[in-house]
């Protein structure tokens, strides 16, 4: 006999599984990218400017957010968006209000916008 609309096989009374949607792949930072980001993070923590971070792996982008305090909004977000690879660049650095400070293909070059500038000592 044929399967009914209820998902049961009327021939032997077995319940057929509902077809699941294929899981969407998540975008992630690889080991090399994390080493570069965490090296900058360590320098900024040592300088007392950053204190916490979060990593989000979404279906369209991976985001590394840095915080001054864990209870606040992120100071900066470092995003990896592969769909922008041919347009503006795969990596971007954004401020808390969403302004993009820098984009590019090379993560090291993009992160230079966040490194501390030398101060003039008089």
Image: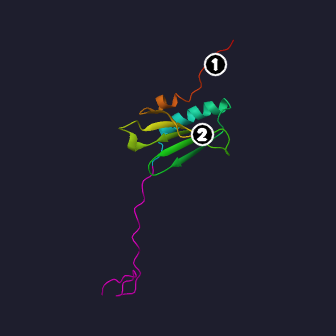
| Left-right relation of 8 to 48 | left
Q: Can you tell which quarter of the image residue 22 is in?
A: bottom left
Q: Can you tell which quarter of the image residue 74 is in?
A: top right
Residue corresponding to mark 2:
66
Judge whether residue 24 is colored magenta: yes
Q: Nearer the viewer, residue 98 or 34?
A: 98
Compared with 60, 77 (above or below) is above
Q: Which residue is drawn at 57% across and 42% down?
A: 65
Furthest residue toward left: 1
Identify the magenta region: 1-26
* Crowding at mark 1 (Cα within 10 Å: few <14, some 14-19, many 20+): few
| Left-right relation of 44 to 94 | right
Q: Which residue is drawn at 66% across and 31% down?
A: 46
Confirm or deny contact between disc 2 and disc 1 (CB under 8 A).
Answer: no
Compared with 13, 18 (above or below) is above
Q: Residue 119 carries which label?
A: 1
Q: Residue at x 66, y 29 (%)?
A: 47
Q: Which residue is drawn at 41% across and 81% down?
A: 15
Judge whether residue 66 is colored magenta: no
Name the dominant secondary structure of the magenta segment.
loop
Compared with 98, 43 (above or below) is above
Q: Is mark 2 on a helix, strand or loop?
A: strand
Q: In x, y percent, where is residue 108? A: 48, 30
Whole-Å distance between the Cαs marked 2 and 1? 23 Å
């Amino acid at each position: 006999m044929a399967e009914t609309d209820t998902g049961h096989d009327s021939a032997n009374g077995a319940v057929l599984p509902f077809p699941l949607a294929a899981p969407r792949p998540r975008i992630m930072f690889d080991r090399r990218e994390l080493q570069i980001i965490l090296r900058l993070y360590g320098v900024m923590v040592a300088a007392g400017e950053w204190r916490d971070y979060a990593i989000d792996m979404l279906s369209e982008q991976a985001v590394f957010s840095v915080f001054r305090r864990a209870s606040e909004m992120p100071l900066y977000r470092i995003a990896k968006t592969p769909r922008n690879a041919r347009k503006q660049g795969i990596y971007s650095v954004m401020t808390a209000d969403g302004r993009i400070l820098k984009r590019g293909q090379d993560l090291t070059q993009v992160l230079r916008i966040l490194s501390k500038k030398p101060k003039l000592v008089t």
